Image: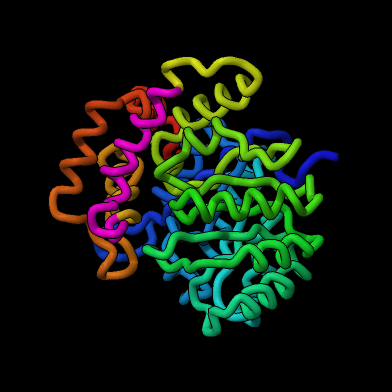
Amino acid sequence: MTHLFGDAPHIIPAQPLAVTDDGSPDWASQRLLTRYYLAAGVTGLAVGVHTTQFEIHDDDALFARTLREVADVVRGAGSDITLIAGICGDIDQAVAEAKLARDQGYVAGLVSPYGLTDRSEASFLARYRAVAEVLPVIGFYMQEAVGGQYFSPDFWASLLELDQLVAIKVAPFERYRTGDVARAIATSGRDDVVLLTGNDDAIVTDLLLPHRFGDGELRFTGGLLGQWSVGTKAAVDLTRRIWDGHDGAVPQDILAAATDVTQVNQAVFDPEHKFAGSIAGVNETLRQQGLMTSSRCLADDEVLAEGQAERIARVRELYPELLDEEFIAANIDSWRDA
């Protein structure tokens, strides 16, 4: 049976929100970004997620417009990529957002912790069930540094009882917790639920290595990643090489790419300050490449760390092939609004 997301590998960048220096939405840059991702060969886009800035969920009109802008570009290009919406808030808000996303052509909702009043596991499960009545859902294990929390193995087992669950994004940035989710899927009997990496610090490792439990094994079928919002074509090419070579020896250049990608991520995501500059770092990378006009974010405290812009410029020089430097320079004019 074909999965809702189509055939693996599933390569789904988290879509940033383009904002001008004065804090207004930059819709021309938003469309430019979407055309870049389509040209890079992604299989899906996630909108309204952490990289898009959770604050858009505090403004119904901004959330709706952002969903629509991305969907319109995708439809206008005749693309059939998977559109995923980030879903936030308590049950009433989450259900309303799911209905809006469904009506805009989004096929699944990534249920995020932002805006949830009661953060008990029971409350999370109740919200998943409510959203699933509207739209297929994606489970989300978010790292604590940016608003996530620990979930017990029992939580994942309970979530996997939900028929409308189609995937789990694992992004705790922690090996043991990643293994908890892999084990839960592998032992659930659910071969229709795919495992997506969101571990930006271990992307290549996750894509390469199977999780083995008894006689069976489970692999990540791809990822839904903020890191893939930059260097997107390189990510597509690398992920496809890894997926196509699962049954053979791993080339040395792919193994080397594991550390190279992490070096790039360190500059972009600002782990030295508990990822405080991660969203601004994504925006700054895209600004330096001409895909955005500003690195500004909606929240005043979402800013670049001291020296982060220089570190991003340095990895652009060191790893141009991982950041699509030639691809963007050669094609950016064709992606702009006519």
- From the image, which quarter does the N terminus lie in? top right
Is the residue 7 above or below the residue 247 in the image?
Answer: below
Between 149 and 104, the residue placed more toward the observer is 149
Relative horizontal placement of residue 200, taking residue 70 as reference (left or right): left
Is the residue 293 above or below the residue 316 in the image?
Answer: below
Give the total of numbered labels.
0
Colouring used for the render: rainbow
Residue at 47% across / 56% down in the picture?
172
Image coordinates for residue 294, horizontal then vertical, percent: 27, 52
Judged by its main secondary structure, the magenta piece is: helix
Residue at 71% across / 65% down in the picture?
159
**Magenta-colored stretch includes residue 120:** no
The picture quadrant where one finds residue 326 is top left
The picture quadrant where one finds residue 125 is bottom right
Is the residue 87 above or below the residue 222 in the image?
Answer: below
In the image, which residues are magenta? 255-277
Can residue 60 be seen?
yes
Residue at 34% across / 48% down in the picture?
282
Image coordinates for residue 42, horizontal then vertical, percent: 56, 36
**Magenta-colored stretch includes residue 260:** yes
Image coordinates for residue 330, horizontal then vertical, percent: 37, 23
Image coordinates for residue 165, horizontal then vertical, percent: 73, 58
Relative horizontal placement of residue 271, taking residue 64 as reference (left or right): left
Between 95 and 182, the residue placed more toward the observer is 182
The picture quadrant where one finds residue 262 is top left
Relative horizontal placement of residue 90, taking residue 129 as reference (left or right): left
Is the residue 248 above or below the residue 319 in the image?
Answer: above
Can residue 323 be seen?
no
- From the image, which quarter does the C terminus lie in? top left
